[in-house]
Amino acid sequence: RDSRSSSSDDEKEGNGGGIPIFILSDGTGWTAEHAVNAALGQFDYCLIDGVCPVNTHLFSGIDDVDKLMEIIKQAAKERAMVVYTLAEPSMAQSAKQACQHWGVASNDILGPLTEAIAGHLGVSPSGLSRWAPERQKTPLSEEYFRRIEAVEFTIKQDDGALPRNLDMADIVLTGVSRTGKTPLSIYLAQKGYKVANVPIVMNVDLPKTLFEVNPEKVFALTINPVVLQSIRRARAKTLGLNGELKSNYCDMAYVKEELEYARKIFAQNPVWPVIEVTAKAIEETAVIVLRLYHDRKNRCSMPRISKRY
Amino acid sequence: RDSRSSSSDDEKEGNGGGIPIFILSDGTGWTAEHAVNAALGQFDYCLIDGVCPVNTHLFSGIDDVDKLMEIIKQAAKERAMVVYTLAEPSMAQSAKQACQHWGVASNDILGPLTEAIAGHLGVSPSGLSRWAPERQKTPLSEEYFRRIEAVEFTIKQDDGALPRNLDMADIVLTGVSRTGKTPLSIYLAQKGYKVANVPIVMNVDLPKTLFEVNPEKVFALTINPVVLQSIRRARAKTLGLNGELKSNYCDMAYVKEELEYARKIFAQNPVWPVIEVTAKAIEETAVIVLRLYHDRKNRCSMPRISKRY
Ligand SMILES: Nc1ncnc2c1ncn2[C@@H]1O[C@H](COP(=O)(O)O)[C@@H](O)[C@H]1O
Ligand SMILES: Nc1ncnc2c1ncn2[C@@H]1O[C@H](COP(=O)(O)O)[C@@H](O)[C@H]1O
Ligand SMILES: [Mg+2]
Ligand SMILES: [Mg+2]
């Protein structure tokens, strides 16, 4: 839905005809961007055909009030709204007032949530931004390095490489080509899970280790054949006819046969949940996998994904 | 800072001593989780030493009011606060009222932002959640597949593999071992950029192509030697003494020499920005790279990262 666009001075600072939304942060801006992305999902119906195109503009590392004012004035000039996360209460206050003063619609993502959490925890927020020099720099945590290790592990296991390492994985994904194993693996890895994925190809033996690991950590992916065919066609186009793919890779008969071949393997391994990925975004499949993964580990009366901070 | 923890019935549904925060979504919950993560940054000072440990519990796919009520009652029982994103206004309203009724602190991440954007765009939100059957399913977009392609490209180029493909990358990262090239590449790839990374190893020739590609897309990473040594030591421990690493990999003299060797290469290529990654999280380095990348492409009067929806 979104796409990187150019912005240049001669196109009115790159609004390129879209309605501008300014995203401001004293940190990276990724949190506010994520929230704006989700909210824009509510306007899909009018974004899609370009009826109300939107341009977001991310300004990160806004650490003093002068920069802040300059950007809000620019927002007024470009008729943008402003969505912000500013840890320092006086900065957030200034943003709010300046937006009111310049007639700019605005929304504070961080303030209300931080206040609510402060009340809940019974302690005060530090008011220090991610990059504040005063912030007692917490050394990057063990968990942080664990996540990086998970990414590196996952890359090395991609596409069935190193089947001897399947037992070291937290999660093993399996399915035919173009069911999204690779991007799903990477998405999960960034959340700290070591993932291995094992492709199923008709009449190619699967690694023995796939049947030796704890079946509770194996997740099977399946997809509608018509959709799979179209994804494979797109891929064949991208890769070109350089012989990397089998000649029948996109044939409907072959696609169906291969899915059926996979289905039989799944049926022989009834502990593996079979997840239908058709029309699901990676992050959607990811939450389904993780819900099952945590349920199986914890057998909670009320299924949930729990984390400790 | 966070770590996956177990939750089980016998530990009071897994609060494990931490103050519980419930995260509720009719979608995946990742948006609300991201916001909670950022807000918890304001309480680092008391989270770190476990003075006020927090447990988050993610409940995704909450698509009917009965489930919603059940979870809010459970939140009351566990003395949790509730952070939610619910696209359907009646669901959001029910959540708010139920929380008030049961004395549960709550925060709506999506509602106020969606309203503000609706006012700005001059159109109404659909009120349909990510998984609503009524939602006219927008087929996964070109952009979506572009992002997946970027991830697959990036994995294949990792660690200097396929140097002949450097010209196909949007961004090329270079630096000595353990400057975070791999996780940074993957992070950027998930945002849709094709990334290649080229390791610098003392007295090992760099691929010629590194000096042939547009230098404006090359980013050099550097790090404090003391920190680098400690990261390398941790890595050596993880990898074990299996001979994958040079014997002097963690020696301070070698670490310093290698960084100096890299510095000289960077000096010979003055167009490459040199980014200091010491104590920076991946997402922080990522925004620095992308800011420079977009500035160079667009030469805007006011630096920004722009996207079109
Ligand atoms: N570890 C942290 N410590 C303090 N503030 C943080 C931390 N991480 C994020 N923030 C703040 O949370 C908001 C969102 O962060 P970001 O996603 O980097 O824009 C910003 O106001 C940051 O300053
Ligand atoms: N494409 C979309 N269309 C409609 N609603 C969405 C979309 N993506 C996310 N949302 C909503 O935005 C909120 C956050 O999404 P999530 O991060 O999946 O929890 C939820 O209320 C979702 O229902
Ligand atoms: Mg793959
Ligand atoms: Mg690497």
Image (cartoon, coloured by chain):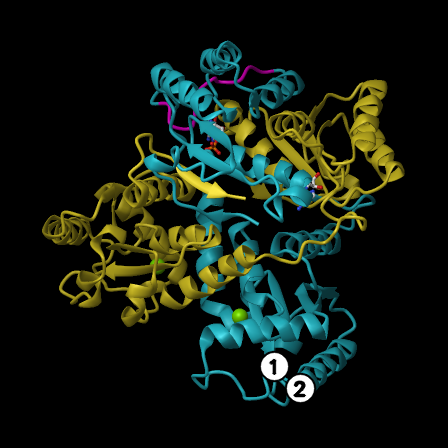
Chain colours: A cyan, B yellow
Secondary element at image label 2: helix
Rounded to the nearest whole Å, what is the CA distance between mark 1 and mark 2? 7 Å
CB atoms of marks 1 and 2 within 8 Å: yes
Label 1 neighbourhood size at 10 Å, few (<14), some (14-19), many (20+)?
A: some
Q: What kind of secondary structure does the magenta stretch mostly adopt? A: loop
Q: Is residue A74 left or right of residue A281?
A: left
Bounds of the magenta segment: A123-132
Number of numbered tags placed on the structure image: 2
Task: Kindly identify the amino acid type of the residue bearing the numbered disc 1.
Answer: Cys
Q: Chain of mark 1?
A: A
Q: Chain of mark 2?
A: A
**Left or right, residue B301 beside residue A1:** left
The residue that label 2 is drawn on is A254
- Give the image location of residue B268, x and y in percent: 10, 52
Which one is in front, A119 or A278?
Answer: A278
> Residue A259 lies in magenta, yes or no?
no
- Secondary structure under the numbered disc 1 in the rendered image: loop
User: Label 1: which residue?
Assistant: A250
Q: Is residue A125 magenta?
A: yes
* Residue B95 numbered mark, or none: none
Specify whether residue A309 is in view: no
Q: Is residue B208 above or below residue B256?
A: below
In the rendered image, which quarter is residue A205 located in?
bottom right
